[in-house]
Image: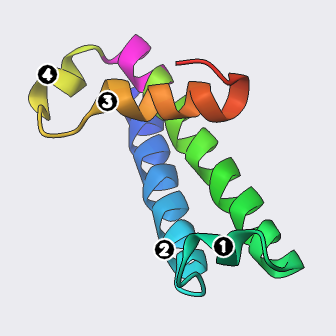
Amino acid sequence: MRKDLLKDKLLDIIDSIEIIESRIVEIKEPDDYVSSKSGLENLDSISMRLQVIGEIVSRINKHFPQLPDNYKSVVWKDIVGLRNIISHEYS
């Protein structure tokens, strides 16, 4: 993964976070995700965005292993772990 591609992928993560934030606004309590069609659509779209973030982080870890060392406050392993739970139901 080239450095310019890394920048693009980090921007993709930011884009996904912004989309998640915009969709969470409508949710006031956990039941809101399952009590309506729009709630379920929000849950699905947020889950997909979390998968995307996890996949990007996994690839970054593989191609730029020094990056997580430079940003120790980010829980890189947990981000990938959440992706694994959502995608494959394992951690």
Q: Secondary structure at mark 4?
A: helix
Disc 2 vs disc 4: which is toward the camera?
2
Disc 3 vs disc 4: which is toward the camera?
3
Q: Which residue shows up at 37% across the image and 19% down it?
A: 61
Q: Which residue shows up at 66% across the image and 51% down it?
A: 47
- Crowding at dot 1, Cα within 10 Å, few <14 / some 14-19 / many 20+, comes out as few
Please name the residue that numbered disc 4 is placed on: 69
Judge whether residue 61 is colored magenta: yes
> Height in image: 78 above or below 65?
below
Q: CA distance from mark 2 to mark 4?
A: 27 Å
Q: Nearer the viewer, residue 24 or 30?
A: 30
User: Which label's residue is closer to the chain start, 1 or 3?
Assistant: 1
> Height in image: 29 above or below 47?
below
Q: Is residue 85 left or right of residue 61?
A: right
Q: Secondary structure at mark 2?
A: helix
Q: Which residue shows up at 12% across the image and 39% down it?
A: 73
Q: CA distance from mark 1 to mark 2?
A: 18 Å
Q: Position of residue 77 (x, y in %)?
A: 34, 24
The residue type indicated by label 2 comes to Glu
> Height in image: 59 above or below 83?
above
Q: Position of residue 14 (x, y in %)?
A: 43, 59
The residue type indicated by label 1 comes to Asp
> Height in image: 25 above or below 16?
below
Label drawn at residue 31: 1
Q: CA distance from mark 4 to mark 1?
A: 38 Å
The residue range painted magenta reads: 59-64
Please name the residue that numbered disc 2 is placed on: 21
